[in-house]
Amino acid sequence: MHRNLCCAVALAAAVFPAYAQDSELSKMREALRQLQQQVQQLEKRLQDAEKTATEAENTAAQAAAQASSRPQSESALNPGISAILNGVYANLSKDPNTYRINGFVPTLGEVSPGKRGLSLGESELGFTANVDHLFRGTLIASIAPDDNSISVEEGYIQTIGLSHGFTIKAGRFFSAVGYQNQIHAHAWDFTDAPLAMKAFLGNQLNEDGVQFKWVAPTSIYFDLGVEFGQGRAFPATERNKNGVGSSNIFTHLGGDIGTNYAWQAGLSYLSTSPQGRVYDDVDSLGTGVTNSFSGNSKLWVVDGVLKWAPDGNATYRNFKLQGEYFKRKEDGTLTFDTLGQSLGTMSDSYASRQSGWYLQGVYQFIPQWRVGYRYDELDSGITTIGLVDSGALTAADFPILTAYKPKRHTAMIDWSPSEFSRIRLQFARDYARMGEPDNQMFLQYIVSLGAHGAHRF
Amino acid sequence: MKSIFKVFLGLALGILAWPACAALNVFACEPEWGALAQELGGDKVSVVSATTAKQDPHRIEARPSLIARIRSADLVICSGSELEVGWLPLLLTQSGNDRIQPGSPGFIEASQYVVKLEVPKVVDRSLGDIHPAGNPHIHLDPRNIAKVGTVVTERLSEIDHANADFYRARAESFGKRWQEAIQSWQKKAAPLKGMPLVVYHKDMSYFINWAGMREAGSLEPKPGIPPTPTHLAELVERMKRAPAKVVVYSAYSDPRAAEFLSQRANIPNVMLPFTVGGTPKAKDLFGLFDDTIDRLLAIAQ
């Protein structure tokens, strides 16, 4: 700019002789001003032209880059869609229809080992995407193969627009009680759930509710959260009532130890008040009766996970150790034979203190291949039944509540040719039924189609 | 008693959180972006990288420690193009941090700003773990580092206005040194032109393209599928007909498959740093390219 101005001045000086008189001087000034203007205009045009050229160049380069990467149709905004397929061949030495966990109140959940022989497992359909700048939505529907039903496994919105470590989730989601409960069955390391989850959470607890979670601004991972739910499933019962039917408080700590280890530990407390939670049993006369429990149910879960991989590179070798301990306290009223099918309806107090735990290790020894072992144990603990203590009935009228310590050993080997497929062979010796050990063999495939899933730690 | 506890809790949290407040927190998904942020941000930024050179950035997990770090991040820089698809979405949703969500100034998907290679015409998982948006390992073309550097500087200045001049000055200095380095690397890497090489994974494509080398095969039968004996045998045969000059693998890959092919086909093999920290010499971005070129030249000569 300055250089151009100087040129203009020099030009003017050269064009107009030095002997110019006063009257001519004003003309010269005028001419100089015009020249300056012209120079400025020219300069501006040049700049504009340059700018347009660069812009065009950039746009061309960008277009070339984007043309290849951006999907052209409106489907570009479709949510991430995925489908999980799984199928099982089961060989069970005991009839799965008689499955029960002795010493524990039946949960009405899907706790049995499933059908014998070849069967299609539950298929899952998942949709997930950011709703807008504030929310993310997830829907995971589970399609049961036989009863023509589609159920919502998870369907929730989650905030992404909050700061300071806060997230709120609302809808139906797997409750943050314990560790494995939050993980979808297809991502489990064994075909079935630990006995403790079967006995205390009815296999897996998904709650309709709201979850508030806060992650602390610390270098070690620390979160605190609370869930309020309807209480739609075991250990709660659905109630026709305003307000909150179940609540869960949880916290986690986690971090790395060097680059080889990562860990997480959690504590959660689930509190519900089931009303008229029914289960079937056979009384001392051999008649099938329906009993019901009303009262308070409180469940503590301590969980821990430790993962190892050399240099944190899990591609070749890695090991995962996982365990959970459950403790449940139930107090309330037990009503015997609610339908008056046998000895008549009677009610009295009921209290139980029960616990259970499992520990499992899974080792990937070469790429694609993993072996694992799991040990389960439950303790039916101390159960006080008022109707038995008062002499109104005998312990033989509540056979399923007879003290027992169910156990199970499980071993598995699986092969995952890619991130999207897995074939697993699992053997278990299950002592859930008193005096009737069940030898179980499962051969299972699990594959995922569509959007690449992201799994929790 | 309760208030004492609160004070203690406050103090404890404050102490733990202190380092997080001192500077602008940059969370890099890969070490190369961490190194770039460090070059451009100097002591005004505190950088953490989610992965190391010994880890496959596609296969790490959403560890609690990463959630803790991304929670306090002001800027997240990732390669994108689905490279981090198995863990980053979880970190983002669990972070409770609105500053680093996609679309906000605090989130940079580096591969958006460069021309991508190997954008597949057909997208099907039977072809392996391919990325529909193209090859995400963009950082091994030094020109891409410069392009992403411009974006990082813009964002640093936007997020931390107070130090905008500082960032611009550093960017200018880095840009100049980087352009000079590119020129010297171009001269130095001239003998690599046309050199056929076998890669482990398709993670060297941008370097191969920049240096004008020629990919003669990969140890993985399909992207993301580990080498199989059949495929290796086939490669050995192919190498007999048209031998490659070198078999390369990255710091995070298992060397055994490369060594196998190397022995059978009588071709040298070399480990390349792949990213910052992959070898002792690859201490920073300059060292990464110096060492990569040196290691290849040692074989070319």
Image: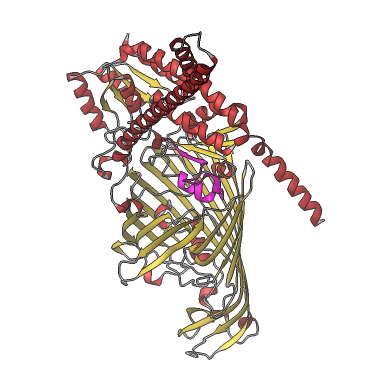
Quarter of the view holding residue A270: bottom right
Quarter of the figure with residue A69 = top left
Residue B38 spot, x, y in % from top left:
55, 28
Q: Is residue A366 left or right of residue A276?
A: left
Q: Is residue B281 above or below residue A119?
A: above
Q: Considering depth in this image, is A280 or B234 the residue closer to the camera?
A: B234
Residue B226 appears in the figure: no
Q: Residue at x 39, y 55 (%)?
A: A186
Q: Is residue B6 above or below residue B56?
A: below
Does the magenta-highlighted stretch encompass residue B94?
A: yes
Span shown in magenta: B87-109
For the question of whether residue A296 can be seen, the reply is yes
Could you say which is closer to the camera, residue A436 or residue A259?
Answer: A259
x, y (%) of residue A418? 33, 43
- Does the stretch in magenta take in B23? no
Frontmost residue, A186 versus B189: B189
Residue in the image at 37% along x and 59% along y: A440
Number of numbered discs overlaid on the protein picture: 0
Image location of residue B11, percent across then percent down: 75, 45
Q: What is the x, y in percent for residue A203?
A: 47, 64
